[in-house]
Amino acid sequence: MHELSLVAQLVAECERASAGQVVQLVRVRYASTIPEPALRQAFRMLSDGGCLATAVLEAEMFDVPLRCHCGFAGTLGHDDLIGGSVVVCPKCGEVSTRKRTAELELLEVRTTR
């Protein structure tokens, strides 16, 4: 579950940015290749007991597109990506590589101040 390592990095960055203050809100963008329930579960698990324990996670998905020679032109899901840069076309099964992009982006950390 590579989502766990991504969220661990997110939590560490939020803790650093908040400087120990209680965090009210964390706003992120995440790739369509990350299941939202897995993102939320990892965030709750990794933020429990710290300055993020009561934080609300606002998550906005962005599409990871694929255009394949078979005619598929659409958004990739969790099962269509292997290791971050290897893509399997959901229509024909062709394997290709793509440029690796950020899968989880931190947009805002709001503290109680």
Image (cartoon, rainbow, N blue to C red):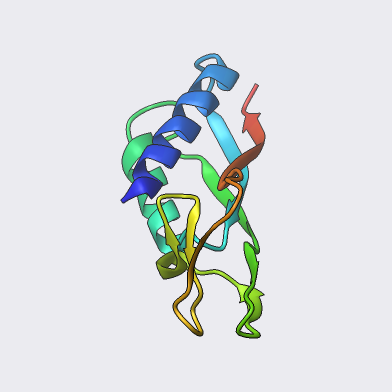
The answer to whether residue 90 is above or below residue 38 is: below
The answer to whether residue 70 is above or below residue 75 is: below
- Horizontal placement of 18 versus 15: left or right? right
Residue 101 coordinates in the image, percent (x, y): 61, 45
Residue 81 coordinates in the image, percent (x, y): 45, 61
Residue located 55% across and 31% down the image: 23
- In the image shown, does 99 or 8 lie closer to the viewer? 99
- In the image shown, does 70 or 59 lie closer to the viewer? 70
In the current view of this chain or complex, which residue is farthest to the top? 19
Q: How many marks on residues? A: 0
The answer to whether residue 28 is above or below residue 35 is: above
Residue located 60% across and 84% down the image: 70
Residue located 44% across and 53% down the image: 39
Residue 73 coordinates in the image, percent (x, y): 67, 78
Residue located 41% across and 62% down the image: 37
Position of the C terminus by quadrant: top right
Residue 29 coordinates in the image, percent (x, y): 63, 50
- In the image shown, does 43 or 55 lie closer to the viewer? 43
